[in-house]
Amino acid sequence: MQLDWTALGQVTTVSIGVTVAVVVVFALGVLGLAQLEGAREQHGRVSALGVTQATLCFLACAAVVAYGIFLIVPQFH
């Protein structure tokens, strides 16, 4: 039995990179929600930038998760 160590290293690198990217994007979404709450407490109104940032970040995270499920489940191919 032989292992292709280069391919294993590539898969590991991509997996770690995507994981870090998704965590950062999710954290930016939480930051957008925090800006929304801060604007609501200070000014009594909703910050459109915070809502937009949170929505886009959470949609990006959901898209990555959906793509991962698409790759894993063979009935989707």
Image: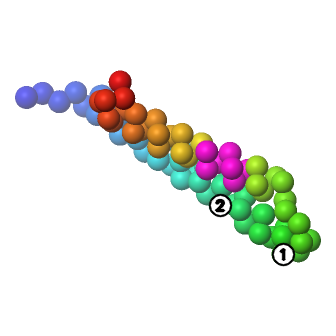
- From this view, report whether residue 45 is shown above or below residue 28: below
Outermost residue toward the right?
43
How many other residues sit within 10 Å of disc 2, few (<14), some (14-19) or many (≥20)? Answer: some
Asked if residue 22 is among those painted magenta in the image, a careful observer would answer: no
Mark 1 → mark 2, Cα distance in angstroms = 17 Å
Q: Which residues are magenta?
A: 53-59
- From this view, report whether residue 46 is shown above or below residue 21: below
How many labels were placed on the picture? Answer: 2
Image-quadrant location for residue 51:
bottom right
Q: Nearer the viewer, residue 29 or 7?
A: 29
Q: Amino acid at mark 2?
A: Val
Q: Dot 1 corresponds to which residue?
A: 41
Q: Main secondary structure of the magenta part?
A: helix
Kind of element beneath mark 1:
helix
Residue drawn at (69%, 50%) of the image = 55
Considering only order in the chain, which callout, 2 or 1, is on the residue closer to the N terminus? 2
Disc number placed over residue 30 in the picture, else none: 2
Q: Amino acid at mark 1?
A: Glu
Q: Is residue 13 visible?
A: no
How many other residues sit within 10 Å of disc 1, few (<14), some (14-19) or many (≥20)? Answer: few
Provide residue 12's location: percent of width, then percent of height.
Answer: 35, 39
Please indicate whether residue 41 sits to the left or right of residue 59 in the image.
right
Outermost residue toward the front?
75
Answer yes or no: do the residues labelled 1 and 2 have beta carbons within 8 Å?
Answer: no
- From this view, report whether residue 63 is shown above or below residue 77: below
Asked if residue 55 is among those painted magenta in the image, a careful observer would answer: yes
Kind of element beneath mark 2:
helix
Please indicate whether residue 46 sits to the left or right of residue 12 in the image.
right
